[in-house]
Amino acid sequence: MGDRPKTVTAAIALFMTAGALAADAGPIPGNPLIEIPAGPFVFGRDDGPENERPRRVVEGQSFQINRTEITNRQYARFVEATGHRPAFYAGHPVLGLDDRPVVGVSWADADAFCRHHRLTLPSERQYERAARGAAALAFPWGAAPPDDMRVNAGAEDCCAADARDGYPMTAPADSFESGASAEGVLHLVGNVWEWTSDVYAPYEGNRGGTQPGAGTFRVLRGGSWNSDPSHLATTYRLAYDPDFRFSANGGFRCVRSEP
């Protein structure tokens, strides 16, 4: 994490810190929507950071989520169609590659993209259900700890890039298939942090009191290419300024919820 930089003209900022079910082609070419079925699932945990408590079973509604993060190519089409401002790292020699997840977008930028396609950003519950599955998994692929075959992540100590997995920064959105969730969704941990629709606040039933940023920040999920292992859990929550659009490791994907 860190304070908003006073100047951002040259610096790259950071958010610090598999089988598939039926897919719908959806409104975003090249990024199908994957069905996540309704049913009970475990949300939160009691053996992690205070802001992930309490652990409880909730009844989830069915929804569909993009198979991958939104890419630079997909975001550029949105910009061309609407006149919306480009992503901050558009044209960057690595971060701006067509097949990489778009980064350098604020919460409002991400929200506008999803709404343009008649979708929304995922809620925290939707993101955690997609990442964790119905079996309360620690990682989308199961219980095995993250490795270079499953996730694009950083060094053991926060928050430095690490190219041992083949990518010093972002990886292609359709890479690391061995790290897919049970429903076949990719990069639900690692690669880029992802905006959710929720305002950051303690979970209902949390007795830890008010948490810094509550009611002001939005929630990011999933960790990124410079995250250490402690930030790659399916339950990890990061509160962040929704107006900040200069992060080189923060992106998003969209969902379609059942009415």
Image (tube, rainbow, N blue to C red):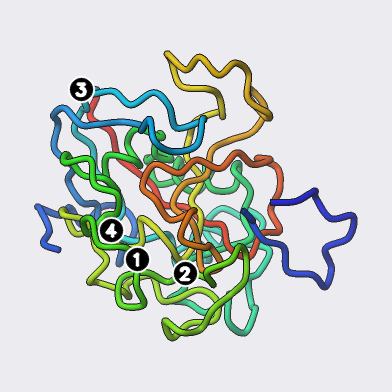
**Mark 2 to mark 4 CA distance (whole Å):** 19 Å
Upstream in sequence: badge 1 or badge 2: 1
Query: In the rendered image, which residue does mark 4 sit on?
Result: 67
Q: Are marks 1 and 2 in contact (CB under 8 Å)?
A: yes
Q: Is residue 111 left or right of residue 235?
A: right
Q: Are marks 3 and 2 in contact (CB under 8 Å)?
A: no
| Percent coordinates x, y for residue 39 in the rendering | 13, 29
Secondary structure at numbered mark 2: loop
Q: Which mark is residue 59?
A: 3
Upstream in sequence: badge 3 or badge 2: 3
Label 4, residues with CA under 10 Å away: few <14, some 14-19, many ≥20: many
Label 1, residues with CA under 10 Å away: few <14, some 14-19, many ≥20: many
Kind of residue at disc 1 = Pro
Q: Nearer the viewer, residue 171 or 223?
A: 223
Q: Of circles 2 and 4, which is in front?
A: 2
Upstream in sequence: badge 1 or badge 4: 4
* Location of residue 32 with respect to 254 vertically, above or below: below
Upstream in sequence: badge 2 or badge 4: 4
Q: Residue at x 70, y 42 (%)?
A: 243
Q: Of circles 3 and 1, which is in front?
A: 1
Upstream in sequence: badge 3 or badge 1: 3
| Percent coordinates x, y for residue 163 in the rendering | 51, 83
